[in-house]
């Protein structure tokens, strides 16, 4: 867990060490999200990935129900690695992060502002791929 504090600090979401089951809100840049050793999960629906684009390192898993989402997420988790959630504007991730934090033994990061926030800051999203999990690409 020692490596976690600098990562989360780089994501501007806390000033104390993170612990499992906690939710943190951050407004990282697209580059910080690509460089951080987190499992980045885009929880939007497939048509939104296609319409807007995605981060190249994002796992694409729609958040429909907590149980189904967790079942799909588990193969992507590595011991101690935080999970960062992104959606369109941050509304869905705010709710999903609170639910997931109760079920996971790692910190959960809610990416505030979502893809629209990253785009407003100048980021140009990439096309989603099947390898990322896009079911309609």
Image: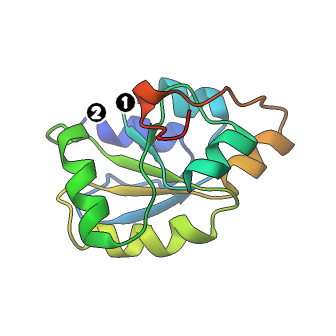
For residue 75, which numbered disc appears in the image? Answer: none
* Structural distance between the alpha carbons of marks 1 and 2: 9 Å
Residue 34's x, y, as percent? 53, 27
- Where's the N terminus, which quadrant? top left
Q: In this view, does 126 lie above or below 21?
A: above
- On the image, numbered disc 2 is attached to which residue? 3
- SS for tag 2? loop
Mark 2, Cα crowd under 10 Å, few <14 / some 14-19 / many 20+, is few
128 to the left or right of 53:
left
Q: Nearer the viewer, residue 34 or 13?
A: 34
Residue at the image position 62 percent from the left and 36 percent from the top = 54
Residue at the image position 31 percent from the left and 46 percent from the top = 82
Residue at the image position 64 percent from the left and 50 percent from the top = 47
Quadrant of the rendered structure where residue 131 is? top left
- On the image, numbered disc 1 is attached to which residue? 37
Q: Is residue 78 above or below residue 67?
A: above
124 to the left or right of 15:
right
Residue 3's x, y, as percent? 28, 33
Tell me if residue 1 can be seen.
no
Residue contact at pointers 1 and 2, CB within 8 angstroms: yes
- Where's the C terminus, which quadrant? top right
Tell me if residue 52 can be seen.
yes
Q: Earlier in the sequence, mark 1 or mark 2?
A: 2
Q: Which of 12 and 63 is in front in this view?
A: 63
| Front: mark 1 or 2 | 1
- SS for tag 1? loop
Residue 127's x, y, as percent? 65, 27
Mark 1, Cα crowd under 10 Å, few <14 / some 14-19 / many 20+, is some
């Amino acid at each position: 867990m020692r490596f976690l504090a600098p990562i989360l600090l780089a994501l501007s979401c806390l000033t104390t060490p993170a612990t499992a089951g906690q939710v943190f809100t951050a407004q990282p840049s697209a580059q910080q999200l690509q460089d951080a050793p987190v499992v980045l999960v885009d929880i939007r629906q497939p048509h939104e990935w296609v319409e807007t684009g995605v981060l190249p390192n994002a796992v694409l898993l729609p958040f429909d129900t907590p149980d189904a989402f967790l079942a799909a997420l588990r193969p992507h988790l590595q011991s101690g690695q935080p999970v960062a959630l992104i959606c369109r504007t941050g509304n869905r991730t705010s709710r999903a992060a609170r639910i997931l934090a109760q079920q996971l033994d790692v910190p959960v990061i809610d990416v505030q502002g979502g893809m629209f926030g990253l785009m407003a800051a100048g980021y140009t999203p990439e096309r989603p791929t099947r390898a990322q999990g896009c079911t309609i690409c």
